[in-house]
Image (tube, rainbow, N blue to C red):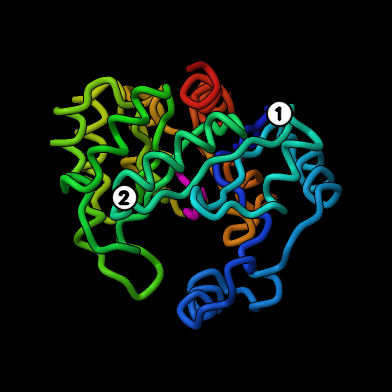
Amino acid sequence: MSHPQQPVIDAWVNVNIGGGGRPDFLKKVAKEYFKQNADDFFRSYSVDEMLELMDAQGVEKAILTTDARHPDEHVLSFPKQHPDRFFVGVQIDPRKGMKAVRALEHMKREHDIVLARITPFSINLPPNHAVYYPVYAKCIELGLPITINTGIPGPPAPAACQDPIHLDEVCLHFPELKLVMAHGADPWWGVATRLMIKYPGLHLMTSAYSPKYFPPELIQFMNTRGKNKIIFASDHPALPMGRAVEEARALELRPGILPKFLYENAERVFFNA
């Protein structure tokens, strides 16, 4: 099914993956999981290049990613030049305790970030571990949504810590937290769906997951009870923005669902604090 062009918010974009080096495990992921050569995967984009790419796909806003404690000045230059098009989400290591909390507070004050991110597989701790709790509390205080990676990761890294069932206790104890599962939830789509039905503040973004391969149960959820729950994101250039947008526009969705998926849900969750 083809749809007329809808405006898009891409909620996970990388403009300088190689800024932190080129670790061997990421080279392997680029080659074997995303079928890309290292130069394309790790390349640094200019502001003009990203604007051209976004304009070609109808992407009005892109949320970029950088580290909270050691922010990438190249990434931060994007919203400085075009504050209406580029926004920043920051990666947090909750094991840093109050240093992580203060870094988050500083980034919100100095750069007006729109979200925090945590990747459980990188620290092999599930998101219901107490070490995460100060970050959750600070996100609520600052009015910041937080994304938590769920599903079996592409890199050779621990998977059990990313089972979405761990978010059950988080949502229970932090009902004010706006929480978004990131990178899909494969193979635990059923668990993720039930949790989103259960908790109003829980959502899912499809970053790094090709829309062409969305499971039928996710499409069914998007078309029914989950129409306000699923958020588009590419994880560009891991999953190229153009490919992700084109595949999203080709999904078999009921009338009115595509605008929610591509734009409205992200606008509500990330930009209407």
Image location (x, y in percent) of residue 42: 65, 70
Q: What is the C-alpha distance between the residues marked 2 and 1? A: 42 Å
**Among the 4 quarters of the image, the one containing residue 248:** top right
Q: Which residue is mark 2?
A: 94
Q: Where is residue 13 drawn, in percent x and y?
A: 61, 49
Q: Amino acid at mark 2?
A: Pro
The segment highlighted magenta reads 206-211
Q: Looking at the image, which residue is at 71% across and 28% down? A: 4
**Side of 40 relative to 114 (left or right):** right
Check residue 209 for magenta coloring. yes
Q: Position of residue 189 (x, y in %)?
A: 27, 46
Please state if 31 lies on the left or on the right of 185 as rendered: right
Q: Nearer the viewer, residue 109 or 267?
A: 109
Identity of the residue drawn at 64% across and 44% down: 245
Please say whether residue 255 is visible from this viewpoint. Answer: no
Query: Counting other residues with Cα less than 10 Å from the Cα at mark 2, is it few (<14), some (14-19), or many (20 or more)?
Result: many
Q: Secondary structure at mark 2?
A: helix
What residue would you read off at disc 1?
Answer: 4
